[in-house]
Image (cartoon, grey):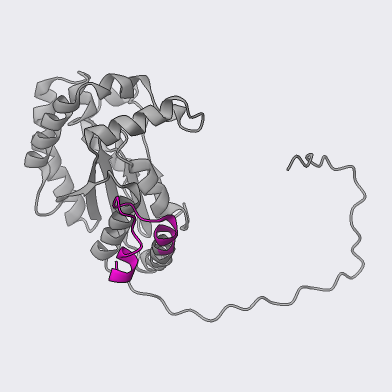
Amino acid sequence: MTDAKKDEAEANGKLKRKAYERELARLHVEFVKLQLWTVHKGLRVCIVFEGRDGAGKGGTIKAMTERVSPRVFRVVALPAPTEREKSQMYAQRYIPHLPAAGEVVIFDRSWYNRAGVERVMGFCTEEEVKRFLQMIPGVEKAIVDDGIILLKYWLEVGPEEQTRRLESRIDDGRKIWKLSDMDLKSYSRWFDYSRARDEMFVATDTSWAPWYVVHSDNKRRARLNVLSHVLGKIPYEELPHAKVKLPKRQHRGDYKELDYPFRVIPEVF
């Protein structure tokens, strides 16, 4: 961000909305270029988002994907595993969702559930966690060695800001769905999550699949920083394209509007 744009920041460190929206619009243009390049070159990109509850994963993913095609940028947010999936090798149910040529797959939480929420909330044993932490670097190396670009982001929010965000969901009809029973149970276990996160980093931060940490107390800055970082980690070029000009519409000819009692919705606005 240029010095001029930094000057538009408020005294408390937050970006003014106009500055944020201008920079986001610029990044959206670059993501469209990345999308076209990904399809053209048949790239396979996998982006993993993890982090504490309320850290802003969903908002960051939305900012990344709102101007690109969902057929290219595909978001995967798996529900709790079925009984059959529980009996599989742990990473097995994630493998089918990895990208094919010309795709960017974004995991809104991923196989790292095992190292985080499943461990802290007692949904797996410590032995299962140990096996996972030993196994997953090898799985990720196989992914990368096969030519998939793998990026892993951890969004970190402070305890006070997390409290503010979760409390804001309680009385907001637009956000109440984001506050599950699991979120409430997890909220009190801040340091259990901290210990689980630290051990996960030590075991799975590798040269072929490193973790990138994003401090997200300031949502706008965090989103812009993530989008900029993703663009910097995936080599792409702007493809040449002809100037678009709309063709002339055909003549009406003998067409007449259909006289039919369509059910038109009422105008309430």
Nearer to the camera, 256 or 15? 15
Residue 175: percent from left, percent from top: 46, 32
Task: Please say whether residue 73 is visible from this viewpoint.
Answer: no
Identify which residue is drawn at 22% across, 59% down: 147
Task: Please say whether residue 51 is visible from this viewpoint.
Answer: yes
The residue stretch that appears in magenta:
1-22
Residue 219: percent from left, percent from top: 33, 47
As for residue 15 lying within the magenta part, the answer is yes
Identify which residue is drawn at 42% across, 53% down: 65
Q: In which quarter of the image is residue 34?
A: bottom left
The quadrant of the rendering that contains the C terminus is top right
Identify which residue is drawn at 33% across, 41% down: 56
Does 60 sit above or below residue 232? Answer: above
Q: Quadrant of residue 263?
A: top right
Nearer to the camera, 205 or 86? 205
Residue 186: percent from left, percent from top: 26, 23
Nearer to the camera, 266 or 231? 266
Is 171 left or right of 154, judged from the image as shown? right
The quadrant of the rendering that contains the N terminus is bottom left
As for residue 176 lying within the magenta part, the answer is no
Is 188 left or right of 207, judged from the image as shown? right
Identify which residue is drawn at 90% across, 53% down: 258
Residue 112: percent from left, percent from top: 21, 36
Q: In which quarter of the image is residue 246?
A: bottom right
Q: How many labels does the image show?
A: 0
Does 85 sit above or below residue 101? Answer: above
Is 50 left or right of 69, judged from the image as shown? left
- Quick one: which residue is furthest to the front in this view? 11
